[in-house]
Image (spheres, helix red, strand yellow):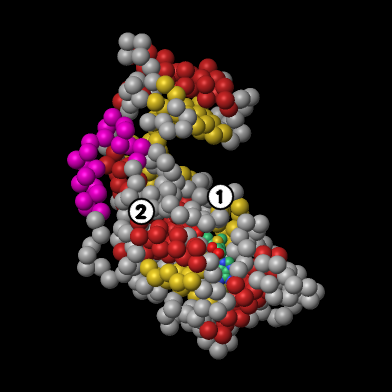
Amino acid sequence: MNELSLFLPCAAGVEDFLAQEVHALTGRVGQDLLSARGGVRVRAGWRDALKLNLHSRLAQRVLIEVAHAPYRSENDLYAIAGGVAWEVWFTPKQTFKIETTAQHSPLQSLNFATLRIKDAIADRFRAKAGGVRPSIETQWPDVRVFAHLTTEFCTLYIDTSGEPLFKRGWRQDKGDAPLKETLAAAMLAASGWWNPETGEVSPQPLYDPCCGSGTIAIEAAQIATGIAAGSSRRFGFEKLLPFQSHVWAALKAEAAPRADRRPTPVFGSDVSHRMVDFAERNAERAGVAQAVQFRGGDALQRMPPAESGVIVLNPPYGERIEVGGVARGRAGPSGAPARGREEAQTEDGGEFFVQLASHWKKNYAGWTAWVLTPDMQLPKRMRLKESRRVPMWNGPIECRLFRFDMVAGSARERAPAPQPQPQP
Ligand SMILES: C[S@@+](CC[C@H](N)C(=O)[O-])C[C@H]1O[C@@H](n2cnc3c(N)ncnc32)[C@H](O)[C@@H]1O
């Protein structure tokens, strides 16, 4: 259990930040720690696997690789899965589930591939445990097995996380489009406010003026106060055979936040008072009610909560999230009354974003704003020149995290009719 091959999947674009975080948590370097597409591979021990689950803010799961071999047919998959010592990990009295993903697999049916892997696991247990075999449970399995098929190779993993790690355990109240906690953490890392390599946090106050259920602010407040990401949830490894409760208890005790830490101030606000209520309740459950301050209010009117700082937000966009506040219900460019979200999408660049930019230019000199959006034309719409653009994925949606520097007196304003920009 001291030299396992772990794979931590993450959102595309987050690999390097995750590698820094894994390095900080395990101390592994060089060939023992490799960034791959969509995740990080690390050679580390069982205790490290537990520690990564408890602390990682960027990984989706922590998987242990148990087989990696070439295959051409479903029968090969049966042989590969049958050769794994599953009895080291779980018992035939437990339930399990297999999730198969594939990239250019030559096989016709992923369902059939999954079935053959399941048969191999069941047959191995039947042979080793006097005819007893574990049963399948698709909703709440005790154990999850992941199979990944490429053109030539099959890789099998046993999962140690259970529910995906973005589920931190504190969110019960959410809006229509909550950000995944892992993406919120990636935004904080990309902005430089949080350094996943050192665990350090900028002394600059952090503010999300469209905070919704509070994901970015709560994630930031937990980082600032030193509360481990997984401190209020359960994990899949608790049901695996190598699990020892005293090892886990010691890891959790080591992770207790230091009382002497003076956290950086964190603020959130939202035009919807219902959302502010949700955010406050979530912060309470996350143990950061004292470390983050939520307020109601329109992002177009709220004044800065501190002299300077860092704004990080994913503003309203798309079908599901309407713009509220003063930009809602004003006349559109045609003179007809505009309706909420549609106004944010108007031809002239969007009333909401134009007003947000001028509010920031006027009142937020000295602040840096990081805005996550799928709208590649956002800087043009805001008539601001971005100083950075970081590619990020919000689930299947390709986004950019744009950085805007609010320079005192002369914001870096665009010409009124800018030319379209080439996209990376
Ligand atoms: C995409 S959601 C943000 C989700 C949030 N990051 C979370 O994880 O829950 C956008 C938020 O902007 C808020 N909003 C819309 N118009 C606003 C305005 N004028 N001022 C402040 N907040 C606004 C909405 O109420 C919504 O909660």
Decide if ligand 1 comes within 8 Å of the CB at mark 2: no
> Is 54 situated left or right of 390 in this image?
left
The answer to which of marks 1 and 2 sits earlier in the sequence is: 2
Query: Along the line of sight, which residue is nearer the eye, 388 or 352?
Result: 352
Q: Residue shown at 25%/59% (left/top)?
A: 257
Q: Is residue 3 magenta?
A: no
Q: Specify the quarter for ligand 1.
A: bottom right
Looking at numbered disc 1 in the image, what kind of residue is underneath it?
Gly
Q: Residue 248: x percent and y percent?
A: 24, 43
Looking at numbered disc 2 in the image, what kind of residue is underneath it?
Ala
User: Where is mark 2, residue-wise?
Assistant: 229
Q: Residue 297: x percent and y percent?
A: 51, 73
| Label 2: how many Cα within 10 Å (few below 14, some 14–19, many 20+) | many
User: Where is mark 1, residue-wise?
Assistant: 395
| Callout 1–callout 2 Cβ contact below 8 Å | no
In this picture, which residue range is highlighted in magenta?
A: 235-255
Residue 346 vertical position relative to residue 32 in the rendered view, above or below: below
